[in-house]
Structure formats: structure tokens, C-alpha cells
Image (cartoon, rainbow, N blue to C red):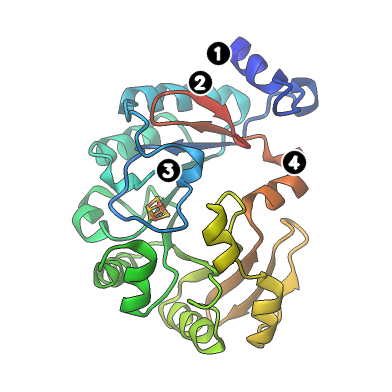
Amino acid sequence: MKQYLFKIFNDKEYGFNHEKFEFRIPSLRVSLISRCNERCFYCHNEGISKKMPSVIQTGDIINTIYLLREFGLKKVKFTGGEPLLFKDLKNLLYKIKHIADVKLFITTNGTLIKKRIKDLSPNIINKVSVSLDTLEPDVYKYITGENLLGEVITGLNMLKRNGYNVEINNLLLKGLNTSKKCLNNMIDYCAENGFDLQFIEMSDKTSKPFYSKYYADPYKILQKGGLHFKKDKSNDRQFFKIKRSQITLCKNVSDVCESSRERCGGLRLLPNGVLKNFLY
Ligand code: SF4
């Protein structure tokens, strides 16, 4: 394992040097499955093809986490595609809790929470991040290609009732959800329900026509909306608090990692079983 990690971290393509990182691997991001049940027009699927074979099994993930404990693994995040499509989720979560003391996070589109909540547990999962760009059904359907806003809201209510720590990820899309009214509706919804909220800048990995049409400069948009953030020195992000909710401004992932390169040092496990540097 150590030799394999040396290979990854010495790869010139990523510009990493294992000595500098002292082989600390604090985080692992696992794309459990490449498929998704939605079709967001901006989806870059975290850089993996939706046709990538999804062959990793619970045992592979458990073995990886078990081995990475030696390198200081503290945090595991499940993504997809849509991670709630991974059938063996309940067993996977249960086993992780028994082999490692790590914080567990899930990022989901929220449409399958109602079906899968029996397989989850707030005692095991530290935070559920739900992608939700709008509270308007027509706009939701336009963005995701599916008429599933009601399912997401039902799922969020269930998470709240069951005591989960919830965060909403709201991608800023010019002309679709960046009016003062839309921003404030989302803030009010999160504040009323005690959910944290992240306003996210669109990634430049999004296909070019969509990027040109919908990219919104987050600072300009949020300032126009009368929202004033202060800087969190620990992670380069900006935030403010309203009731119990923290509202954060998140620049796109490449910027965040660029400025956090020294502490990033995470790995990604892909649905085809390949282990990659986080910046892949
Ligand atoms: S929910 Fe996420 S993974 Fe699914 S299509 Fe939308 S952006 Fe892509």
C-alpha cells in the first residue's frame, strides 16, 4: 500500500512530493457509483464518466479505509453519481464504524432519502450534504431534468426529524437562482429548518456553453443580494450566521484546493476501484 501511495504522490502530473506531505492522508472521497437518477445540465460527475463500471464492493472500501488508518485517515466522504443508489450502504456504514474512528459524510441529490433513510443513521453519519439549487419546482425540473423537488423536501424533513446534521449545497446559476428573492428564500428555508447552507461557484469544468450562460460571480451576486460575509481564516471561505444556520460562500473546488494545497492531501476511490489523488 505504501509503495502504491508513493507512486501516486510522486506523480509529476499532480506535482506532489510525498516527503512534503509526510504521507498524511486525512481524507478519502469515495465515489460509490457512477450512475445518477438525475440529469443536471451542469453535471461534470466529479470528473468521472457516468458509464464508468461501478464495481467497487463494500469489502474493497473497507479494506482501503482500514489501510489508510495508518496514514492518519480522519474523514470519509461518499459521493457518486448518486451515492444512495449504492445497494449495500447500510452494511458499509455499519462496518466502517467498527473498523475505524473516522468522520463520515455523504453528498446526495436528496431524491432517495425517503427510500434509504432506514439504511442510514445520524449516529454514524456526521453530515448529509444535499444538492438543492432552488425551491421552485419548474426551475428544479429545468436544472435536474426530473420533477423530484417534492421528494427532496420530504427527504430533508425526514433528516431533520431524525436529528441529522444537514447542509444544503446551492450552486449559483445566473438567471435561475441568483435574484435577491431566490437567495433570501433559500436562506430563510435553511434558517427555519436549522440546515447549514453553502452557496457554490460553478466549476469551470462544466461544459462551455452552460458555463458561459450560467456562470455567476459569487461575490457580485451575493453582494447585490445584500449578503455580507466575513472570512473564516481556517479554511479560506466566507460565512455569516443566521439563527442556527451557517451560510457559507464556497469558491469552486479547484480554487479551494489551490489555496489549501498543503493541507488537502486526500485521495479518491472511484467506482471502478482506482485510487486517485484528490485533485484528479
Ligand atoms: S445530482 Fe449530482 S451527480 Fe446527479 S446529475 Fe445532478 S450534479 Fe450530476
Marked residue nearer the N-terminal end (2 or 3): 2
Identify the residue at image location x=34%, y=55%.
39
Identify the residue at image location x=66%, y=60%.
251
Amino acid type, mark 2: Leu
Tell me the SS state at disc 1: loop
Residue carrying label 4: 261
Q: Mark 4 and mark 1: span between their CA atoms?
A: 23 Å
Above or below for 169 versus 91: below
Above or below for 153 versus 82: below
Residue 67's tag is 2
- Closer-to-camera residue (99/193): 193
Marked residue nearer the N-terminal end (2 or 4): 2
Query: Which of the 4 quarters of the picture holds residue 5?
Result: top right
| Side (left or right) of 274 relative to 221 | left
Q: Position of residue 102 (x, y in %)?
A: 50, 39
Marked residue nearer the N-terminal end (1 or 2): 1
Tell me the SS state at disc 4: helix
Q: Position of residue 191 (x, y in %)?
A: 48, 81
Residue 1's tag is 1
Marked residue nearer the N-terminal end (4 or 1): 1
Would you say the residues marked 2 and 3 are in contact, meaning their CB atoms lie under 8 Å apart? no
Amino acid type, mark 3: Phe
Q: Mark 2 and mark 4: span between their CA atoms?
A: 23 Å
Amino acid type, mark 4: Arg
Residue carrying label 3: 78
Marked residue nearer the N-terminal end (1 or 3): 1
Crowd class of label 2 (few under 14; some 14 to 19; many from 20; radius 10 Å): some
Viewer-nearest of discs 4 and 1 = 4
